[in-house]
Each structure stands twice: as structure tokens, then as C-alpha cells.
Image (cartoon, coloured by chain):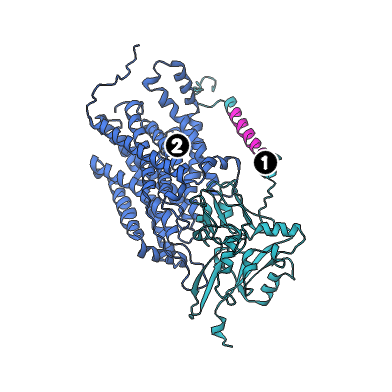
Amino acid sequence: MSADEPRPEKKPSALLTRRDFLIIAGATVGAAALSQIVIAGPLSADAVSGIERHGAASGAHEWHMGIDLDRCIGCQYCIWACQATNDVVKDSMRWNIGFWDRTANGAEFFMTRPCLHCAEAPCVKVCPVGATWIREDGIVAMDYERCIGCRYCEVACPYDARRFNWAAPDGDNALDRVWGAAEVERRPRGVVEKCTFCVHRIDRGLAEGLVPGVDPQATPACVVACPVGARVFGDIHDPDSPISAFLRDNDTFRLREDFGTEPKVHYVRPGRDTEEPS
Amino acid sequence: MTSHAIAPARRPPLTPFRLWVAGLVVLIVAGLVGAFYVLRYGLAVTNLTDQVPWGLWITLDLSAIALGAGAFTFSAVVYLLKVRRFEPVARLAVFIGFLGYSAAMMALVMDIGRPDRFWHPLIFWNVHSVLWEITWCVILYFTILLVEFVPTLVDSPAFDTRPRLRRLGHSLHRFTPLAAVFGLALSLLHQSSLGATYGVLSGRAIWFKPSLPVMFIISAVAGGTALTLLATLLTGKLSRRRYVSDELRHSMARLTGFALLAYLYLKLWDWAATSYYAHSPGTADALARLAVTSPYQSTFWWFEVLLAGVIPAVILLAARLRRDDRLLMMALGLIVAGVVVNRWNVTLSGLVAPPHWSPGVLGNVTAAAYFPSPVEIAVALGIIGYALLAFTLGARYLPLFPHGEQ
């Protein structure tokens, strides 16, 4: 009965044959596997360049910074030291920015902000090439060799902490020598840069047995330059570190915690002088 | 030689067609000069800043991709849903998609600081980045558009003398249903992800909402189908032919109209839920700042909602109104313009009014102004010129309407 019925005619020209499908599927899976081997394996760019990448802070150290806005006198030494050390030529490119602001009850204070090295950094999530990532010690690092200059990280960062090299950074660094010699290479045109927590000092310092946050050579330039000790730095896992003491002794807050970014820079509120006159 | 190669006339008469082509060539030359400046001097020649790092070019590639959405929509409708009555416009839709995506990629290469590293997303993966996903989708989908476009190309008279290449090109036909499946999947992904580019950024309240990806893809379907119908009607008018039957024309207009209606519905609730029935502090603050520093509010309500939304929706869905050629084409043109204005408004709104993060009351967050520089405008015009010229030549020399006159 069913044999009598003519079966609907097949149109092989319009359809994909099983063989074609298998070839395409096989090629796709093969290509994906190959690319994974290239990316993750011993041939990966990370392996070749020796860069270790991790999703979140999981190492022995975790670096945090404290900024006491009540103690800060607004001398801007931290800004200049940063510019000299990291060879930031233009003022508009500053990694560590500062400006005068006022509290709700009228107390003036100098607001400064390095990169906050967020644990949930939006810039890290959005980078299409993984040119920025969170190291084991929590530092949000940049790979200038990998960055394509799409600036999505700048768009994603709600703290305005990233700077793009719109032009090649030419000319002398006016702050060089007076505020410290350049310790890192200048970045090329077309890539994004930002505060590194002076990661070069931390890595070299640890290798030499120094303690970042305590020994100046192993501590971010801005912290070292501060004449009133308004900035402290250190390992949050070490209870004796300056940052651990800072967090114990002060009532601190972080910038816009409602963003869910979990910054690693902790502030002490300004204007206590006006509330409790001494 | 028996071919009908066009011999160069000694003094070509200034026909409107030639004037049009000459004008487009001028745009392309201007674009090339602009591109030279960008590559030679870097993005310092733009008016982009660290506060507004994305501007005209991002708007251009978001718009070009959205307006190319007719390709996946009609491919899916014809080859997957088997609604054969839309088949006469499938080739044209694919051609427009091809031009839109190639234009978008040109704008992107101009926009990135290191064009020499454009291939990095293919080698260095960050699967958590929507932009990484978009890059992959756009490249794969562009390949699919190429596969879908080849049969049109080999059907052109230029391949009359190359039957083997033509057969080879036609052998790609058998992949059409497969291409439609992948094209649909890839388009559903990246057309929405382009909205998610902004929608996932928790630090910018005016963007941070799950409605953005959905609004992007629905507006892309409305804009893409609108442009396909507009291009069909324009091509027919200029060549004095009727490529689509009245029935098909009404079907397409209704499809666009319903997509537009769905978009307006979402847009209404997107606004009502964040700004009318609730107070969302970040969004309210950004909108207040935009109101005094930019034409955002007026372009949003007058252009996006009324001129490019409600009015065209009425025209497209009222049978008596859409029968009028001029009214219909005006409605379609407004939708296309509305997509561009929307992509500009979405991009700029989050950047021009950034969040306030200082513990003080002043902050240093000042509303930034942005207007593209001459070089940015020249490059954008050059890319638009390329798309229009390629479309003009395609409409003239390619068999975009294999079904002939209706």
C-alpha cells in the first residue's frame, strides 16, 4: 500500500548531502581544535612571550592601595612622580589624575585617582583580544603588543582610568629627572594605556627580596612621592602590611561600589576637620 | 572579438547616471584622502577623545550592519520558512547585506588604532567579550554573504564566456539552505550583541539594560527590510520596470511595519520602566545632563519615536496609505534614517554623560561635546560613496532580479 504511493521526490541539488555535512562539520571541529591548540598550547603567544594570564587574583600576594583624602594636601607630587616614572609625556594622558573637589558640607579636598585595579574589571571583560587581564596578584595588566586600539575598554571603564595614544608620544618628558627617571618604555601610537600600580617595581622588588609597600624601590612611585603619607600600598594578605593597617585603622570606602567593579583602591573620606574641629 | 565591450566614447554625454557616478567617485576620492591622513597621522586627526572614544565611524558601522539585516531576514523567510513569494527580492537583500557588511568592516579598520592588528581577535580569544563574539560573527557572516552572492555574480553577462566558472558558482546554490541557517544564527547573535556592546556595561546606567540587545535586533530587522524594499522600488523607478508585484510589495511593507511596531512597543516600555514608572538615578542623571548639553531628548522623541517610528508604522500598515508610491518610499526612507539616528544617540548618550565617581559634589565629570572632524566626515562619506557606487553598478549590471518584471 505504501509502496504504491510515490515518495516525494528528493532534490539533491538543493539539499546538503550527508557527506557534505560531515566534511563541513569535521572541518569546523578540526579548525576549532587546531586554533585551541595554537592558543592554549606551547605555541601560544603567551607561552612564547612568557606572560601568565589568570582570571582573578589567586596568588600569594594581592596588592591594594589606600588614599587618605583627609590627609592629602593637594601638592600633586603623586601625579608628577607617576608621569615621570611611567614616561607619560602629555598631561592629558595622565594615569594618575587629580582635581579639587568639595564635600556636601563645603570642605575642599584634592581628589586623586589611579587605576582602581578592579577585581571585576569591566575593561578586562570587554577586550576582544585579551590584551588586558587580571594577574594572579590582582593587578589589571596591559599587553601593548596585543592591543588593537578599539578603545572598548575606555568605553567600559566607568572611572575614566584609561588613555589612548591618539598620536605618537613625542618630545621630552619635562618631569623626567626632577621627579624620577622613566622606568618603562613609552607606548606606541594606537594602543590604550593605564596605571599599572608600577608593576615593574613590584616584580623586580619581589625578585630582589624587597617588600612592596615598605621598600621604596618596590613601591608605586605615587606612594613613595607623597610627602604626608596620604597614600599607602601593600599586600592585603599580609596583616602587617601598610595597607592592612590602613584598612584596620580607618573607615574606608571605594568609588561607586554600586557598579559592582570591586576596586582595589580604598579611600578615607575627606572633611573630617570640619566635622570635629580640633 | 565578439563581446560588447564598451568602447570609450570620445566625449561622453553628461547623463544623470554619469553625473551620479562621478559624484560618488568624488566622495570615494575624498574618503581615500581621509584614510591616508588617518593612517599617516593616527587617530589624532579625529575629534574623538578619551571621554568620547567612539563617534561617527562606530555609528556608521552599527548602521551599515543593521541596515544589512534584510539579507538574513529574507534568506531565512525564503529558504527556511519556505515563504516563496519573497524570493524575487532575496538576491537584492543579500547584495545590500554584502555592501553593508563590507562598508562596516572598512569603517572598523579605520577606527582601530592598530589596523595592522585587525586579525588579532581571530588568534587571541577572549570569549567573555561581546566584541570578540561580534568580530567572529561578522567575519563568518560576511563569508556566508559572499557564498550567497556568488550565484548572482556568475549569472552576470561578464560570465557568459566562462561557463565553467558559472557552473562552479552555481554549485554553491546547494548550500543556500545551510547558508540561511548559519546566517540566521550568526545574525541573531551579532545583531543583538551590537546592542549588548553597550547593554552589558554596568558602569553606565543609561546603557546598562537587557532591552538594548533586543531593541537592536528588532530595529535592524525593520531597517533592513525597509532598505530592501526602498532599494527595490527606487531601482524599479529609475529603470522604469516593476520588479515586485503589488502583492509582494504589500507583504514587505507589512513585514516592515510589524517589525517597527514591535520595536516601538519595546522602546515604549524601555522608557516607561526606567524613566516614567521608576526612578533610576544613573539614567535620570545622564538624561538630565544630556537635555542641557545635547539635542538627545528632541532627536529621541521627535525623530526616533515620531518621524521614524509612529508615522512610518501607520503608513506601512494602512493599506490605503502604502499604495501611494511617494508616501511609501518616504516612510521607508524615514525608517532607514531613524536607524542611523538611533545608533548615534545610543552611542553618544552613554559617552557624553559619563558617570560621576568622585566622593565630592563637583566631580570632574563635565559633559563632553563631540562633533566629527573633517577627516572623520570625509572617510565616512567615502565609505557611503563606495556602498552607493557598488549598488548603482550592481543594479545596472548584475541580475539582481532573476524573476524579471512582475
Q: Is residue B226 above or below residue A207?
A: above
Depth order, front residue of A102/A205: A205
Quadrant in which the C terminus of chain B appears: top left
Tell me how far mark 2 sits from mark 1, CA to CA: 39 Å
Letter of the chain in blue: B
Q: Is residue B32 above or below residue B272?
A: above
* Majority SS type along the magenta span: helix
Residue designated by label 2: B76
Whether residue B246 is visible, yes or no, is no
Colour chain A is painted in: cyan
B178 is within the stretch colored magenta: no
Q: Residue at x 42, y 59 (%)?
A: B352
Horizontal and vertical percent for residue B69?
42, 41
- The residue carrying mark 1 is A44
Q: Quadrant of residue B369?
A: bottom left
The local crowd at label 1, few if under 14, some if 14 to 19, many if 20 or more residues have their Cα within 10 Å, is some
In the picture, measured across the screen, residue B124 lies left or right of residue B387, that is right
Q: Residue at x 57, y 47 (%)?
A: A147
The chain carrying label 2 is B
Residue A38 highlighted magenta (yes or no): yes
Q: In the image, which residues are magenta? A: A21-39
